[in-house]
Amino acid sequence: MAFAVPASTWENGFRQPATGHPWVFDNGEDGVNDDPDAYVTPPSKEIVTSDAHNDLGINVIRTWPSLYDGTNSPHGPPSWWKPSEQVDVLISGAGPSGLAVAASLARQGVTFRIVDKSDGPLAAGRADGVQPRFLETIAMWGLAPEVHEEGPLIERTAIYKDGEKLLFDRSHQSDSRYRGLHIITQGQIERIYVRDLARHKAIVERRSVLSEYTIQNENDAPYPIHATIKNELTGATQTVQAKFLVGSDGAASMIRKGLDIPFDGVSTGIYWGIMDCLYITDYPHAWVFGSVISSKHGGCVIIPRENGYIRLYTQLDLSMTGPLAASRQARDPMFNEAGGKIDVHSITPEEVLEQANRIFSPYKLKFGAPLSWFAIWKISERVARSYSSPDNRVHLVGDAAHVHSVMGAFGLNASILDAANLAWKLGLAAKGKAKTDVLLPTYNGERRQHAVRVIEVSGTYLRFVCGSDLYVPDLRNIEALNRQTPKGDISYVTDGNASNGHAANGDKSNGHSTNGHSTNGQGVNNDFYKDNSPAKRLNGDQSKEEQRKADLEFLGTFFKTNGQFLLGVDCPYGPSIIRPQITDSVTRPINVKSGVRAPNTRVCFGTGETGYLYDKLAGAARFHIVVFGSSLSGRRVLSNLRSFVDAIRDPEGFYNRFGGAELFNIVLVTKLLPFELDTIAPTARELIGLLRDEGAQIVFDDRAPDEDAHTTWGANHATGGVAVIRPDLWVAMTAFPDEMAAVKDYFAGFLL
């Protein structure tokens, strides 16, 4: 939300403007005696959202400290909050990634505490959009509707260059139910998470920091993390013991630094002036996502926001950034590494608007409202060399593990995938249900490679918009990075002067080792990366039309290569203990590969209800055993289904050995109509009954054959097929229904 929620009334059945404060309940109104036990509206306060302002006024938002500010509430923490000195997980940092880890752990019954140095949730600015995969992930936790209904849906992109339209077309198209890019402020997401945690009797410990910690692994200590939490407001300290520590403490992460993990990459020297505002303009696509590029002055990025607002990223020219680069803050090694918001007052909103007008020329922009947010931001592109400590007791998520430009909207979206990937693994390990030294290393293997590709994709697009020759850092080969800067050095740092197309380490081979431990077999997918050629900038002897042709060729190739990655749905994980190696020569019961996002097809739940397969895959730490049973009529599929049922009921089978319905969710997908369950052969009816006794859900695949679930998944109608889907909705493995011994071996590899 860019501004305070306006006073409104629904007296006529729809929203209309109102006067006063209709949210304040007056217990003594109309002569009614005060009731001391009646509801009392909590106090609110207004927060100025921007550090700088234009001449149209000052923007504020309304917030509710007793609801959002945790221990920093003026009324103190709620009476139901009972923090323990021993918890399963301690989370340092309550931005979106830390809060997402907490949301997942809360649903698993895993104890945690979460601390943050801020007064409350972010008031304005920073991340601004979520990809379909983000929404698919939080839908497992029941939170997607609050997010995707907030702001505009991005499904078009417009790119202008030197005053002329270069591209205007459909974009952000995916097979997800959530389709494109959804706009929402980071602060709104944080508030959604905070309300959710309150429902689970958890709050954020505000104005508190992790001042120090030690790891005591001797004698198999049940809580090896010994941490000191300091309240920066009162100076009070307390000791908390935990099994695991999550560092979600931002780009300048002290936890990462304490682990001596290098933050490899480049400080680009590219600065954005960022302004959230209403604009008056004659630019024809002002409320369409896209870019405006000037060959002479740089680029702007347009992100439509709620209620007609626009976030405008404007590349600052050298006359503005020169003094910034020489500033004390810019010379600080920590800031030079992490980048981010610059504390500077020498550049005004009017100057950034003037620069934007140079880039937009011949179109004009002017402010139409007070600024909702203003910031000067330096771009760094970095990835932590490891996401985990060698003993897998400490893990990094979000900006603590990776930073990059706005291009692609990856920051918030990569973070939710970090959180979802890590949290279910932490939950199982904390409960003693998984082999810590086997399962947790897959977090680093799977998630770091995603961030490296984010750097490559986002960085390539950034350089096209900004007209930069700076190379995109190659961070794939950890062994090469280790040769350049061994563990303990600050990081692989560049000065930003090398030209585009030259690799940072000159070695594109995918050797992997982290903190001295090989990551091969821990989820790294050597086929995941895609080479992105930089945009061509032709010399002055060639025509404007030739440059336009080269630009369109770049954009066509770039989006074809990275389109689904930009939406979060193209993210295959490589072989590991939780993703068995695939042999192409072996006949598979299901065509969908292991390690990829589980397709989410439409299905029928009953006579009066339809939905999506994911609707039956809710939860934070359950594996989903999806069985494709065709029409339940073929002799072989029934025989295989009988074998599956026997394995599920076997006391020594994977289902009963590793947790039953608490850990496994069985879904049978049938090519039947709901009423046909009463007419199928007795053998099939018996099997359905036995599956239901084990808590299985039955869904009906009644769509046309060219769009049904069996076709989407490539399921074998003659034999049936089983897909094991991980808690974070990636395909773990597939098997024929009579191959449950292989499934048992799979789970025995990492579960206890």
Image (tube, rainbow, N blue to C red):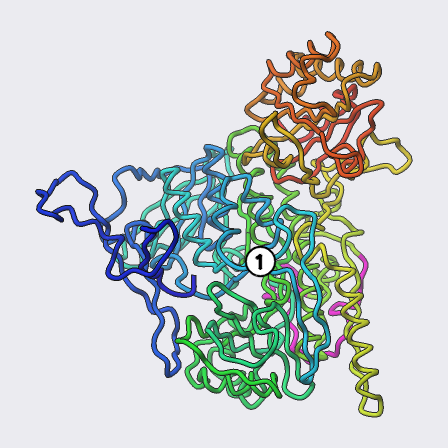
Residue 557 pos. (x, y %): 80, 65
Q: Secondary structure at mark 1?
A: strand
Instruction: Give the side of residue 584 with respect to residue 111, left or right.
Output: right
Residue 705 pos. (x, y %): 79, 34
The quadrant in which residue 407 appears is bottom right
Nearest the camera: 363 or 235?
363
- Looking at the rendered image, the quarter that the N terminus falls into is bottom left
**Is 633 above or below relative to 405?**
above
Q: Main secondary structure of the magenta part?
A: loop
Residue stretch in magenta: 485-509
Residue 141 pos. (x, y %): 51, 39
- Looking at the rendered image, the quarter that the C terminus falls into is top right
Q: Circle 1: is it few (<14), some (14-19), or many (20+) Cα within 10 Å?
A: many
Nearest the camera: 743 or 697?
697
Q: Amino acid at mark 1?
A: Leu
Nearest the camera: 289 or 532?
289
Q: Is residue 561 visible?
A: yes
Q: Is residue 752 visible?
A: no
**Is 52 above or below relative to 506?**
below
**Is 546 above or below relative to 304?**
below
- Magenta stretch: includes residue 732: no
Disc 1: which residue: 153
The quadrant in which residue 442 appears is top right
